[in-house]
């Protein structure tokens, strides 16, 4: 989009607006995954209607432009709307203006020593000769060496400070974390010896599931907790059927067959009976005629 | 291999045949023409087949010694079959199936067989007869054993529970007497009862007629029933009907009839 201006003041204004637009673009690009203008236009439609004074002011500004007045006006209005949104969001206290944050930062030159520490820290999951990890304390001490300390400097307000109690409770509740489990697995994998004899190999295979557990239980893993009376005494499922007549007779035969069937689970047997119930419900009209 | 080496450490678990480890001069295979079976070195036939080199008797002794710590003693009070039967009259039989395959499942594993001797159950005459009628072919008369095979449920423990439930229900039902049981006819009887049977009626009528023609004073039925000839006749008829026709049964019947009708042997 190109907005041409004549005066320096307007240029300044529009420059700031552009910057802000880009900032909100980036911000919304960070918030949602689209940074195109069209999507923000959609957002515009969704938001609340703007202050009529602002609208008038925007149209006045746009009318002062030599070219593409409507486009400018629409873009200004869109920008205003985005302002409304951001103010709402920030009133609720959610968003961060990344632009402000990034402006404070500068690209830091890494000393080769620090780079080496970083890389070696990444590879340091393998053990040293003594079998000890490279202590993370070393890297923090190195960071002091480069002249910039962790505690000094302006707070960036990126993270909200959690209260110490919640930290403690988090520690007790979320143990063991997934990292603890991985660490434990790592230690077990490194310290295990190959099996010394055939018996230890068989133990290892049984743990892995390669060898069956002896004495063999042909029903290992098949138990669903049902009792024999749930399989055999199925009359209680016939409550909704008529008490006399051919339907009852038929359903009693169905139940007799189901009770002798050892290959279905209780749930499947109940489903069978349900199917019949639904079938007879549907055909009720036909049956009444008979 | 040294002569005094421990063989169970050479083959602790099932392993393929290693010709260098096994010091025996074994030959296996189809003999070469005009020759002998091939030797053990590189002999695939020996490697293919399963061997039991890991289960020599000393190795098994060691296994047993190791397992002994996990075992409990057989109760000393149960030193004979009769005592076992007396204390544990119900026998449950289940089968586990092992096979070489990917699946551990076998549908035959759910079958439970329950065996009990009816003499161990507390049944009176009516209850026993009713129970036998209820179970039908599952009762063996010669050994007095009731066998119930249960396989209606998918799992073994469900079948076992159902079996115990069935036995309990049978026992209690056989003790109850229903109203319609009084309509039991002669065809339903399990054994022949002479009292109130046609044989008794015929015999008594015949005797009464004989007595009437001889003009003997009124002899009552009870006297006749109590008399020895009638008793003999009764026993022989019962024996014939219940046990079938045997040589001794028929001769006994002949004697009793002769005595009853006072038929003298032909001179």
Image: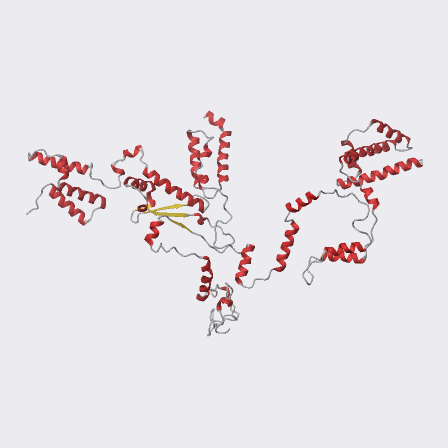
Q: Position of residue B73 (x, y in %)?
A: 41, 57
Q: Position of residue A150 (x, y in %)?
A: 78, 50
**Snapshot quadrant of residue B200:** top left
User: Can I make out residue B254 in this image?
Assistant: yes
- The residue most toward the right is A7
Point out residue B12 in the picture as x, y percentages from the top left corner: 50, 65
- Please indicate whether residue A191 sits to the left or right of residue B239 in the image: right
In the image, taking residue A270 as reference, residue A11 lies left or right, namely right
Q: Residue at x 74, y 58 (%)?
A: A120
Q: Quadrant of residue A77?
A: top right
Residue B252 percent coordinates (x, y) = 15, 46
- Quarter the N terminus of chain A occupies: top right
* Observer-nearest of A212 and B151: A212
Q: Is residue B226 above or below residue B251?
A: above
Residue A3 seen by the camera: no
* Residue found at the very far front of the displayed protein: A165
Residue ID at (34%, 42%): B135
Q: Compared with residue A167, is residue B196 higher up or lower down, i.e. above or below?
A: above
Q: Quadrant of residue B118?
A: top left
In the image, A110: left or right of B171? right
Query: Which residue: 30% across, 32% down?
Result: B179
Q: Quick one: A187 or B58, which is closer to the camera?
A: A187
In the image, taking residue B228 as reference, residue A220 lies left or right, namely right
Between A171 and A83, which is closer to the camera in this rendering? A171
Residue at 65% across, 54% down: A183
Indicate how the structure is coloured in the image: secondary structure
Position of the C terminus of chain A, as image quadrant, is: top left
Across the whole image, how many numbered discs are drawn on residues?
Answer: 0
């Amino acid at each position: 989009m190109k907005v041409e201006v004549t005066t320096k003041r307007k240029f300044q204004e529009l420059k700031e607006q552009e910057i802000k637009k880009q900032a909100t673009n980036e911000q919304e690009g960070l918030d949602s995954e689209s940074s195109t203008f069209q999507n923000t236009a959609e957002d515009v439609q969704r938001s609340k209607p703007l202050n009529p004074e602002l609208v008038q002011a925007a149209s006045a500004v746009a009318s002062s432009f030599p070219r593409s007045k409507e486009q400018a006006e629409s873009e200004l209005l869109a920008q205003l709307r985005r302002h409304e949104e951001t103010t709402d969001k920030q009133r609720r206290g959610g968003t961060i203006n990344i632009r402000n944050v990034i402006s404070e930062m500068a690209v830091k030159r890494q000393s080769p020593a620090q780079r080496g520490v970083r890389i070696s820290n990444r590879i340091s999951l393998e053990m040293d000769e003594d079998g000890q990890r490279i202590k993370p304390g070393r890297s923090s001490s190195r960071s002091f060496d480069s002249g910039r300390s962790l505690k000094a400097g302006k707070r960036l307000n990126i993270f909200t400070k959690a209260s110490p109690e919640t930290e403690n409770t988090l520690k007790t509740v979320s143990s063991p974390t997934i990292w603890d489990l991985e660490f434990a697995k790592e230690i077990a994998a490194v310290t295990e010896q190959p099996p010394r004899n055939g018996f230890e190999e068989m133990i290892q295979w049984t743990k892995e599931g390669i060898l069956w557990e002896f004495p063999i239980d042909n029903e290992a893993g098949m138990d669903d907790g049902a009792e024999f009376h749930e399989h055999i005494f199925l009359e209680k499922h016939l409550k909704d059927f008529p008490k006399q007549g051919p339907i009852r007779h038929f359903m009693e035969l169905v139940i007799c067959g189901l009770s002798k069937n050892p290959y279905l689970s209780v749930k499947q047997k109940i489903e069978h009976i349900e199917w019949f119930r639904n079938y007879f419900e549907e055909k009720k009209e036909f049956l009444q005629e008979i | 291999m040294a002569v005094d080496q421990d063989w169970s450490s050479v083959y602790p678990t099932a392993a393929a045949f290693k010709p260098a480890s096994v010091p025996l001069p074994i030959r296996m295979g189809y003999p070469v023409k005009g020759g002998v079976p091939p030797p053990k070195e590189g002999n695939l036939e020996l490697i293919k087949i399963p061997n039991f080199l890991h289960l020599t008797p000393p190795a098994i002794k060691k296994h047993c010694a190791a397992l002994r710590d996990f075992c409990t003693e057989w109760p000393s009070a149960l030193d004979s079959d009769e005592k076992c039967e007396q204390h544990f009259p119900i026998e449950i039989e289940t089968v586990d199936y092992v096979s070489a395959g990917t699946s551990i499942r076998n549908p035959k594993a759910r079958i439970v067989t329950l065996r009990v001797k009816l003499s161990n159950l507390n049944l009176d005459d009516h209850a026993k007869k009713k129970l036998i009628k209820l179970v039908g072919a599952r009762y063996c008369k010669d050994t007095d054993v009731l066998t119930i095979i249960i396989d209606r449920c998918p799992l073994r423990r469900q079948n076992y529970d159902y079996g115990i439930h069935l036995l309990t229900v049978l026992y209690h039902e056989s003790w109850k007497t229903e109203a319609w049981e009084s309509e039991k006819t002669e065809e339903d009887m399990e054994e022949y009862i002479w009292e109130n049977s046609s044989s008794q009626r015929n015999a008594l009528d015949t005797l009464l007629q004989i007595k009437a023609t001889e003009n003997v004073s009124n002899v009552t039925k009870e006297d006749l029933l109590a008399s020895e000839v009638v008793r003999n006749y009764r026993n022989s008829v019962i024996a014939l009907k219940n046990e079938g026709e045997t040589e001794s049964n028929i001769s006994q019947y002949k004697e009793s009839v002769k005595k009853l009708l006072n038929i003298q042997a032909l001179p």
